[in-house]
Amino acid sequence: EAQVTQNPRYLITVTGKKLTVTCSQNMNHEYMSWYRQDPGLGLRQIYYSMNVEVTDKGDVPEGYKVSRKEKRNFPLILESPSPNQTSLYFCASSLSGWPGEDYEQYFGPGTRLTVT
Amino acid sequence: KQEVTQIPAALSVPEGENLVLNCSFTDSAIYNLQWFRQDPGKGLTSLLLIQSSQREQTSGRLNASLDKSSGRSTLYIAASQPGDSATYLCAAPNSGYSTLTFGKGTMLLVSP
């Protein structure tokens, strides 16, 4: 089954304790992206990756890191989480992300992160 | 930067009604627009992707239109059902960039 998977689905952690949220897709997609969703603010893009070893900042990259060593994986790293990073996080992928190319984005099920 | 607005924020209708959800965007130099559905506590499911060369796209009871000149897209749902209850989001690309801007969504409740 074609899908985007995220782990963990739920995570409660404490301020400053490094964590990684994994994202994997099995559709051979070039483009992958991370979003966060907050009440009243909607979905905002954190980072994206056009292909392996190419990543770039979205609208809200502060406090996050990403890496794209393999095509299928795009982990989100919080080196020193803070309470304002409590949010619902989504990973997404599409065949291509180049401007002007028409490909749907497919989303993972989400990771609910709470930082106390 | 693209700004995307969705009206109304919430909508409650009885089963069987036809309804229209609205999405407006500020930068009309878009090459497509995508509509998503989000169920509570779940991820986003892509419903329709309308290319800039199209004016409409249909999938079952759903029909989405795109008018770049006016900066608007509409999602029409025919003969609504309780199973259509969800939040509907539209997303437009940021011109020249590989990023998307999402609207805040319309929360739809269809009552039996």
Image (cartoon, rainbow, N blue to C red):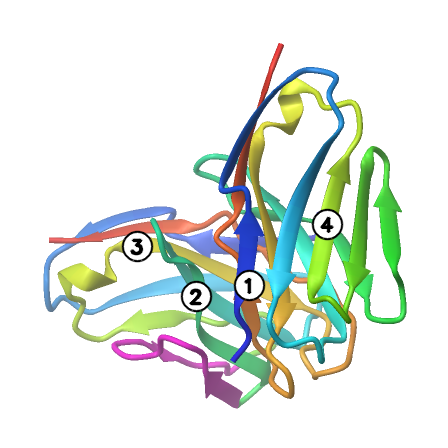
Identity of the residue drawn at 38% across and 70% down:
A76
Amino acid type of the residue that numbered disc 1 sits on in the rendered structure: Val
Part of the protein shown in magenta: A54-69
Q: Is residue B39 above or below residue B93?
A: above
Density class for disc 4 (Cα within 10 Å; few <14, some 14-19, many ≥20) is many
Instruction: State the SS at label 3.
Output: strand
User: Mark 1 sits on what residue?
Assistant: B4
Amino acid type of the residue that numbered disc 3 sits on in the rendered structure: Ser
In the rendered image, residue B81 lying in the magenta stretch gets the answer no
Q: Is residue A42 above or below residue A80?
A: above
User: Mark 4 sits on what residue?
Assistant: B74
User: Mark 2 sits on what residue?
Assistant: A44
Q: Are marks 2 and 3 on the same chain?
A: yes
Tell which circle, 1 or 4, labels the residue nearer the N-terminal end: 1
**Which corner quadrant of the image does residue A75 belong to?**
bottom left
Instruction: State the SS at label 4.
Output: strand
Identity of the residue drawn at 82% across and 33% down:
B61
Amino acid type of the residue that numbered disc 4 sits on in the rendered structure: Thr
Q: Chain of mark 3?
A: A
In depth, the one of B44 and A66 nearer the eye is: B44
